[in-house]
Amino acid sequence: MPILEVENLSISFNQYTSSFKQNNIQVISSLNVSLEEGEILAVVGASGSGKSLLAHAILGILPDNATISGTIYYNGEVLTASKQASLRGKEVAFIPQSTNYLDPLMRVGNQVRTSVKTGDATAAQRAVFKRLHLQPTVENMYPFQLSGGMARRTLLSTAIVSDAKVIIADEPTPGLDPVVMKEALNNFREFADNGCAVMLITHDIESALTIADKIAVFYAGTTVEVAPVEDFTGDGEALRHPYSKALWRALPQNDFIPIPGSQPHPSALPTGCLFAPRCKEAILECGKKQPEMRNLRNGMVRCIHAT
Amino acid sequence: MQLEAKNIGFRYDNGPWLFQNTNLTVEPGEIVGLTGPSGRGKTTLCRILSGYEKPLEGNVTIGGLPISSKGVHPVQLVFQHPEKAVNPRWKMEKVLSEGGKLDEELFDLLGIEQEWLTRWPNELSGGELQRFCVARALGPSTRFLIADEMTTMLDAITQAQIWQAVLEMATKREMGIIVVSHEAKLVGRLCDRVVKF
């Protein structure tokens, strides 16, 4: 049984277009994803595809003008707002995308120690700093004294020292040099191997492939494919969705050839398959209605052509 | 008309020297990678080459002559975060007009849609905004382009789209490019030679 399951999640935002006019923009539509214990799920996709919003929805920290439908299950039970509040920071740890999430008025060593729930907090904090190559003097610094990479490592530390069962990491690696990046990624792998579940949100497919078990590909606010990492190989012939294939082939180590066009804006989503306007295989039927997510070859896909 | 930095030295205020006696030459049409750990001064060197900072030692020349401080700078820099490089209170049309009169061909090449011109910067995604920043930097008088982690925040398809457009323009105009990136595979794909900083 998955520890975390997101079923048919949709999120829309109410926005004022002028003083008295509001409109509703759908940013995530019928999204399905599940996370198993002992597993790392990488979520990849373009910016604006709804990756961070999914994380915020799971934690219950979306802004007030967001409307949510669909269900999130945690350990088989429906995840309600009060449950979210009691779990986050404890069983569910979050590594936010922006380093602005650190408390600007608290020494970073102390911030990390507050996440330690059992045992010697100071020792745990020092051990994790050492592991991530942070000098002992860093613990007495304030966030404004840190470089981008140091702040990023502090955020990682707070999750590493916690006893969380689920870690949701939103773009945890930009700005890290290759040595520290590897250490951070290894840490996630260890977590998973100890029975935790990790959701790694990233646009860096290459580093995701080195540690993840499964990859969920997002496009325009929904999942188009969930595939085991082994399928990301060669020309991408093992992949299921045309967008995943295009993404894979556009990498500099592969063909480096892009498909034309760009992801539709949430206010102008096509009626049928969200990828149809850019898809070479699109037929009339693709433009009619959004295909359902279906199981295919040990993965999932949202495309009527996929075999 | 090669771009040459000779014996460049720089430090902020009275801090330690970030670098000294640094030399770099880029020929027209050449693509040079610049890599190295963060904090070494790669971005500062780029800012010096493109005229945002003055070197404390040494000088920067194009074709052996110092660069005029008047008019459009022939070396243009594209930054990592496009949302920090455009005026949030200007519509995209006005943002683009900063680059002077631009080639219509550029818009097609970069996939900039007409409809985006009337939007505000916060109504575009990072990838869409970066296309504008690239277009703005590719005015008719640009001889060298510096891409400082230009596509680090973008997905692979958008990254490839922008680079293919830039490469095509570079070949056509015989423009030199400096690529700053941590991504070894991208640098390997794009560059004629790589300088470790």
Image: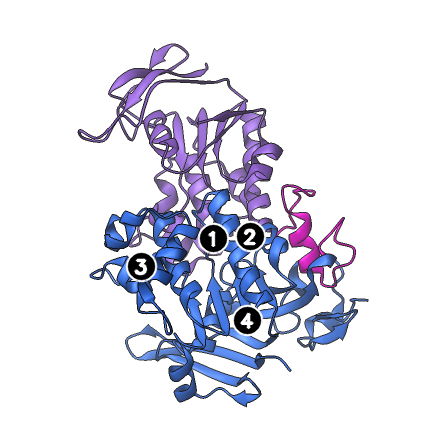
Amino acid found under the numbered disc labelled 4: Cys
Judge whether residue A161 is colored magenta.
no
Same chain under badges 2 and 3? The reply is: yes
Whichever of labels 4 and 3 marks the residue nearer the N terminus, that label is 3
Residue B120 appears in view: no
Same chain under badges 2 and 1? The reply is: yes
Comparing B194 with A129, the one in front is A129
Q: Residue furthest top?
A: B64
Residue B161: image x %, image y %?
58, 45
**Nearer mark to the viewer, of 4 and 2:** 4
| Residue for badge 4 | A196
Q: CA distance from mark 2 to mark 3?
A: 21 Å
**Element carrying mark 3:** helix
Question: Mark 2 near mark 3, Cβ–Cβ under 8 Å?
Answer: no
| Residue for badge 2 | A204
**Which dot marks residue A100?**
3
Q: What is the chain letter for disc 4?
A: A
Whichever of labels 4 and 1 marks the residue nearer the N terminus, that label is 1
Q: What is the chain letter for disc 3?
A: A
Question: Mark 2 near mark 1, Cβ–Cβ under 8 Å?
Answer: yes
Is A84 drawn above or below residue B71 in the view shown? below
Amino acid found under the numbered disc labelled 2: Asp
Query: What hue does chain A carry in this figure?
Result: blue
Amino acid found under the numbered disc labelled 1: Thr
**Which dot marks residue A52?**
none
Residue in the picture at 49% in, 49% down: A181
**Element carrying mark 1:** loop
Q: What is the chain letter for disc 2?
A: A
Q: CA distance from mark 4 to mark 3?
A: 26 Å
Q: CA distance from mark 3 to mark 1?
A: 15 Å
| Residue for badge 1 | A173
Residue A103: image x %, image y %?
26, 63
